[in-house]
Amino acid sequence: MKSTSVFVCSLLFCIHSFAQQFSVSFPDSLLSTPFTGSILVYLSKTSKEPRQASSLLDNAPCVRINVENINPGESVLIQASALTFPVPLPDLERGEYYVQVVWDRNLGGQFIGQSPGNLYSTSRKIRLRYQSQETFSIQADHIIPAYTFTETDYIKELKVPSKLLSDFHQTPYSLNAAIRLPKEYYTSPKRKFPVKFVIFGFTGNYHYFSGYPNPMEPIDTIPCIGVYLDGNCPLGHSVYANSDNNGPWADALIKEFIPQLEKTYRCNGARFLHGHSSGGWSVLWLQTQYPDQFTACWSSSPDPVDFHSFQKIDLYAHENMYYDKDSTLRPLGTIAGQVPWIYMRNAYQMETVIYRGEQMHSFDAVFGPKGPDGSPLRLVEPYKGEIDSAVFNHWKKYDISAYLVKNWEQVKNKLDGKIRITVGNQDNFLLNYPIRMMEKKMKELKAGIDFVYYPGDHFTVQTPQWVKEGNLFFEGKYQEWLKKK
C-alpha cells in the first residue's frame, strides 16, 4: 500500500511540476479564414527541422490537438492533456529541443509536416525544465509552398486528369509523372520507343526530376522513355492498387494515364515496370494483376510480398505485432538486418499522433476496409499491438504470394519469365524473409520467376552489378517482345 501511494504522489508531482506549455497561433497574412483541423508540435534533440520526422525512421516526440474555428491571431494553448508520443507531455525527457508547429489543413498532401498549404513555424530551440512556469509562444510564419516543376529538353511533366479518382474522392484528381526522354527522341524524330515505368518508394516524389538536364538512360543499349510515378496520396502511398480507401488507382493508371501517355509521346507499346521498396511492391502488384498490360517487371526489395512474414510476423497466425513470444519488442527497422533501430510499437504509436500519411497508416489505407467514419480500419490496436482478425481478412487479397499460389495455373502463360525480384541479404526492413518464403512456394509450382539476392541492405543493394543485371533482364524481355510483334 505504501509503495502505491508513493507512486501516485510521484505521478501527481510530475504532472503538476510540468507547467510549461505551448501557445500557438497564426497571422491573417498566412490565412485569413478560421482554421479547423489538427495542430501538431514536432520536437527533436538532433534535427533542426523536426516537422520532417517520419514514423518509419524516427522516434521523435510529437504532440497533437484538434481544434475548430480558430481565428487568425487567436492563441491556442497546448497543455498536458494533449495527445503525445512517446509519453505524456509532462513525462518527456528534460533538455533542449528544436521545435516546430504545423497547422494541418488536410489539403491532400501526404506528409503533414511537408504538405503544401499547411502553416508552419520557423524552427527554434527551447529547453524543457522541471518546475518551470514558462509558456512557449510560437506563431506560424510560413506556408509550405506548392510543388513546382521546371521542364527541360529531356524532362517533362505529365498531369492526366482522372475521372475515376475524381468521382471516388468527389474532388478533382489527376495522375502525375515526370517524363524523361532519350536523346534519340530528337535525333530520330519518327522513331517510337519502349517505356520504362519507374515507381518511387515511400517518401519518393517525381518532382525530384524538376529541371533535370540529362536524357533518359537506355535499357542496356536500348533507348527508352522513362515515366517516373510516385503514387503519393493523402493516406500514404497508393502503390497503384485499387483500394477501399484510396480509390481505383490501378484502373486510373491503366485506363486513363497510359492511354494519354501513349497519345502524347512516341511509345511503341512495350511497357516495363521497375520499382524499389514500396515501388517494388507496386510494380509486382501491377504485373501480377494486369499481366497483359506490361511486358516485364523488375521488383527490387518490395514491401512484404507474403503476409506469413510481415517484418517476420505471421499475420495469418494473428501474432502480436509488437511483442515476440518471449516478450521482446519486434523490430521494424534494423542495421544490416540484425540490430534494431526502430520497433513496430514505436511506429504504430507515433502514428496515433501523426494520424495520416505515414507508413503503417499507408498499409491500412491500401489493404484494409473503410471504417464507419470514413477512415481506414486499423490492423493493429495501437496500445497493445493486437491484430484485428476481421481487418486482416480484408488484407489477404493483397498477399501477392498467396494470389500467385492460388491462381498460377490460370496466369502462368501470361507471367512465366516476365518477373524478376531482387533484394539485399541484409535488408534493413527484413524484406528478404518474405521473398525467400515466396521463392520456395514458386519453385514448388515450377513458376518462371527470377529471384536474385545481392550483398547489402535496403539502401546499399543498388550497386553497378545490380543495375547491369536488371537492365540485361529487361533487354532480353524486349528482344522477346520484338519477335512476337
Image (cartoon, grey):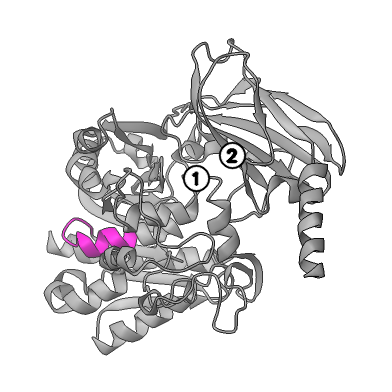
Q: Which mark is residue 355?
A: 1
Q: Are marks 2 and 1 in contact (CB under 8 Å)?
A: yes
Above or below for 429 versus 133: below
Q: Earlier in the sequence, mark 2 or mark 1?
A: 2
* In the displayed structure image, the side of residue 327 where residue 286 appears, left or right: left
Q: What residue is drawn where x is 40% and y is 57%?
A: 378
Is residue 46 in view?
no
- The amino acid sitting under disc 2 is Arg
- Report the front residue among 240 and 218: 240
- Report the front residue among 19 and 203: 19
Element carrying mark 2: strand
Q: What residue is drawn where x is 52% and y is 11%?
A: 32
Q: What residue is drawn where x is 55% and y is 15%?
A: 71
Does residue 420 belong to the magenta stretch? no
- Relative image position of residue 207 (x, y in whole percent): 47, 36
Q: Residue furthest front?
A: 1
Image: magenta residue range: 283-294
Element carrying mark 1: loop
* In the displayed structure image, the side of residue 13 where residue 203 appears, left or right: left
**Label 1 crowding class (10 Å Cα cut-off): few <14, some 14-19, many 20+?**
some
Q: Which residue is mark 2?
A: 64
Rendering quarter of residue 102: top right
